Image (tube, grey):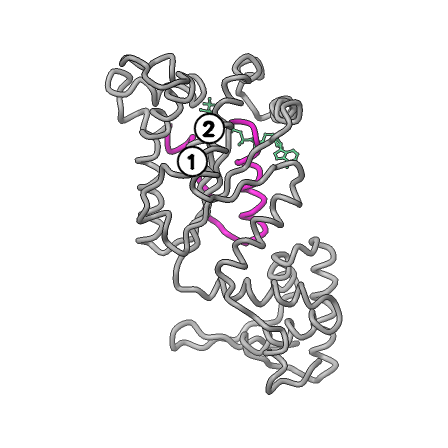
Amino acid sequence: MIMIKGAVGKKEYKEPFSKGIMARSLHITDLGHDEAYEIASCIENKLLEENISEISIEDLAIFVTNYLKNYVDPVLAEKYIKWRNVRKSKEPLIILIGGASGVGTSSMAFELASRLGLKNLISTDMIREVMRKIVSKELSPVIHKSSFNAYESIRTPLLGPDPVVEGFISHVDVVNVGVEAVIERALKEGISIIIEGVHIVPGFIKEDLIRKSNVILFTLIVRDEDTHKSRFYSRCRQPWVKRSLDNYLSNFHLIRKTQSFMIDQAIKHNSKIIDNVDVKYTIDIMVNDIIEKYGGSYDVRQESKGNNDN
Ligand SMILES: Nc1ncnc2c1ncn2[C@@H]1O[C@H](COP(=O)(O)OP(=O)(O)OP(=O)(O)O)[C@@H](O)[C@H]1O
Ligand SMILES: O=C(O)[C@@H](CO)OP(=O)(O)O
């Protein structure tokens, strides 16, 4: 049995090598579960071949990196070690995923959390629901509407060129107070989190938060109208979904207006836009951006210094 040595603070521990844990850590390199498990088995065999019965976490990471570089793919080796750099960071990772209703922010947030091994995920719809209990309809009618039809509840004269966008802005502005509260709490507590929903709009979140190096914002869109519309059918086919298909189809033109506004905001604030046409494409882009931004620079050759290539 191979024992892995680690330390939490000054307290040292040893635990048996687990192919399952190794496979999960390889999942970040966009290897499928089965392939990652197979490589984890090969790594275990390689360790046994080299009569390694005990190895530190740090040396195991170098061993895995060199194994990926020499026997699998240097690009995967780079992704693996960069992601480890991200996870070793003392700062929490705050990932914000915005997008109009139905583009796939919830699904992609769940997929990304699974790929990155992040445990904290919250939707802005949930934040809004809590705020709706606290803020009365009289005080803020817009928060008690959907983002795309909030304009119907605005009591003041509509001044902007497009009432739908004006209503969306008012709605997001209020919910954003809750979104910023969650970001601030996550930063204060030091927990990495993914926050997703229509209320994540470039230019709405306070500069001192969005400017932080460990806060990253993606705007998901679906450029093609028919594809976007199909997402509502796809969602409503899921048995647990209670939201009515008609509500979104009858307001689809309004939802598309909110998407156009989000695209304008993302361009204006130089924020990443991803056309969410394919799950793997979307997740790979987000993972690569996160690793590039946080993983630091890494030259695969660095790991071979002082370690025999395996
Ligand atoms: N990249 C994708 N390719 C194919 N289907 C997708 C993709 N992303 C999401 N979907 C599907 O589209 C439907 C809507 O996705 P999801 O519920 O995540 O949207 P949403 O943006 O969270 O919507 P809302 O903000 O209204 O809750 C779901 O059935 C989901 O499985
Ligand atoms: O406000 C919205 O655009 C959507 C986002 O999910 O919420 P609801 O389904 O409540 O309309």
Query: For the point 64% across and 27% down, which residue is it?
Result: 224
Query: Callout 2, which amino acid?
Result: Phe
The amino acid type, in three-letter code, at marker 1 is: Val
- Indicate if the residue with disc 1 has its beta carbon within 8 Å of ligand 2: no
Q: CA distance from mark 1 to mark 2?
A: 9 Å
Quarter of the image with the N terminus in it: bottom right
Which residue is at a point 55% across and 62% down the rendered structure image?
83
**Contact, mark 1 vs mark 2 (Cβ under 8 Å):** yes
Residue marked by disc 1? 201
Q: Quadrant of residue 206?
A: top left
Total marks drawn? Answer: 2
Q: Residues within 10 Å of mark 2 (few under 14, many from 20)?
A: some
Q: Assign ligand 1 to one image quadrant.
A: top right
Residue 92: image tag: none
Horizontally, residue 291 falls left or right of residue 300, namely left
x and y percent of residue 194 in the render?
46, 45
Give me the residue at 44% from left, 41% from top. 195
The quarter of the picture where residue 252 lies is top right
Specify the quadrant of the image occupied by residue 139. top left
